[in-house]
Amino acid sequence: MKSILVTGGAGFIGSHTCLTLLENGFEIFVFDSYINSSKKSLKNIIKILKKNNKDLESNLHLFKGDLKNVRNIEAIFQAALKKNKAIEAVIHFAGLKSVKESIVYPCSYWDNNVTGTINLLKIMEKYNCRNIVYSSSATVYKVKSNKLLNEKDECEPVNPYGQTKLTIENFLKDIFNSASSEWRIACLRYFNPAGAHKSGLIGESPLGKPNNLYPQITKVALGKMSEIKIFGSNWPTPDGTGVRDYIHVSDLAEGHLLALNYLLNNKPQILTLNLGTGKGTSVLEFIRIFERINNVKVPFSFSKRRDGDNAIVVANNSLAKSILKWIPKRNIEDICKSGWNWQLKNPNGFNK
Ligand code: UFG
């Protein structure tokens, strides 16, 4: 059984990926600071598995710590060795992820995301672990037109969060070039993650008021927020509102599993892949579909465009499809249904 370190494994995408890894026979070592996540997500993963008659609790090991502290990272590699289960690969989710916050606290973003990743790679090198799947973002692209974005397109992030994501991708290229016959690296650029596991036991649980559209829609539907403010009604799109590529979190989780297996079963290489559906949905369409599927009301009003926004951000996902044989299986209706199921069962997310 292969041992995988998952940094940030208690978070939204991390927890769904941990579940998928356990279901597929991996032993996982989760490292999380819980500053933006909850241990309850990991407890609920065990519940989901038990409901399916799988008792895999002994394959999940939890470590609380911070990537800024190399000793915290080393402790996991040591613990795995003691169990005779050397860490074979890392899936690296941990990091700060709010665009807005990154503009106010750039030091914190560069320190957590970039320094944290450098620390992680130092320890990986020390323990001869040279396989990593990295959580990048479509936010690295310079969006110039409305065409589907592909991995060769120009990158030029417009905020500190995006800068840290691209800097880490570049750092991983340097790491690869330093020993290209040894490293296996995949940078996965996510488009707009949304939805929740079908059980309603794990999902997105933002602290405070969410900035992204999807968690706001569920909060408005629940009556915890009065309305959605739609940022702009005059974008060059069919209905004038922004178009994005919303990808179901369970499809993303499966993308990580496939990327990991691909790396472990192929020659050393570095890959950069978009994980998106290739299909755009406008803000108005998203709201309308959510209302129809769940039979709820999501009031909205129009306000001015948000700084740094683009009209259309949609993935060309043909590379991930051809290399990983990854096919997103869930559509926007599934996102609306599963997200609402999670929100109804957990009105406060994992927060009290
Ligand atoms: N939007 C609104 N009102 C809101 C929030 C969003 O109208 O209150 C609109 C935006 O203008 C945009 C769409 O909804 O058209 C989606 O916006 P999000 O904030 O949900 O997502 P973004 O596409 O701006 O950015 C997200 C993440 C980034 C990530 C990026 C990848 O926030 O972290 O997707 O493309 F990098």
Image: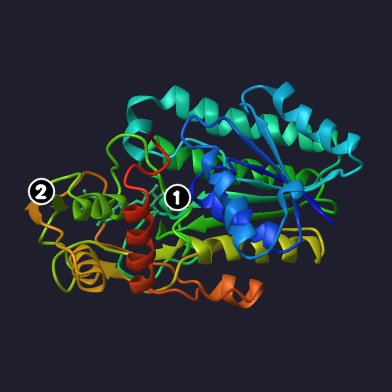
Q: Foreground: 138 or 211?
A: 211
Q: Is residue 330 left or right of residue 309?
A: right
Secondary structure type for disc 1: helix
Whether residue 187 appears in this view of the structure is: no
Give the residue number, with chain letter if any, for mark 2.
Answer: 304
State whether label 2 is within 8 Å of ligand 1: no
Q: Quadrant of the C terminus?
A: top left
Q: Where, by quadrant of the figure, is residue 55 drawn?
A: bottom right
Give the residue number, with chain letter if any, for mark 1.
Answer: 140
Whichever of labels 1 and 2 marks the residue nearer the N terminus, that label is 1
Secondary structure type for disc 2: loop
Q: Is 175 placed above or below 56 here?
A: above
Identify the residue shown where x is 61% and y is 30%.
116
Q: Is 151 placed above or below 230 here?
A: below
| Residue kind at label 2, given as amino acid type | Lys
Task: Find residue 299 and report its horizontal and vertical position in percent.
Answer: 11, 57
Whether residue 179 appears in this view of the structure is: yes
Identify the residue shown where x is 38% and y is 32%.
102
For the image shown, how many numbered marks are present on the structure?
Answer: 2
Q: Quadrant of the N terminus?
A: bottom right
Task: Find residue 195 and report its horizontal and vertical position in percent.
Answer: 40, 60
Q: Foreground: 51 or 313?
A: 51
State whether label 1 is within 8 Å of ligand 1: yes
Q: Where, by quadrant of the figure, is residue 107 drawn?
A: top left
Identify the residue shown where x is 80% and y is 47%.
130
Q: Nearer the viewer, mark 1 or mark 2?
A: 2
Identify the residue shown where x is 10% and y is 60%.
233
Q: Is residue 181 left or right of residue 156?
A: right
- Cα separation between marks 1 and 2: 24 Å
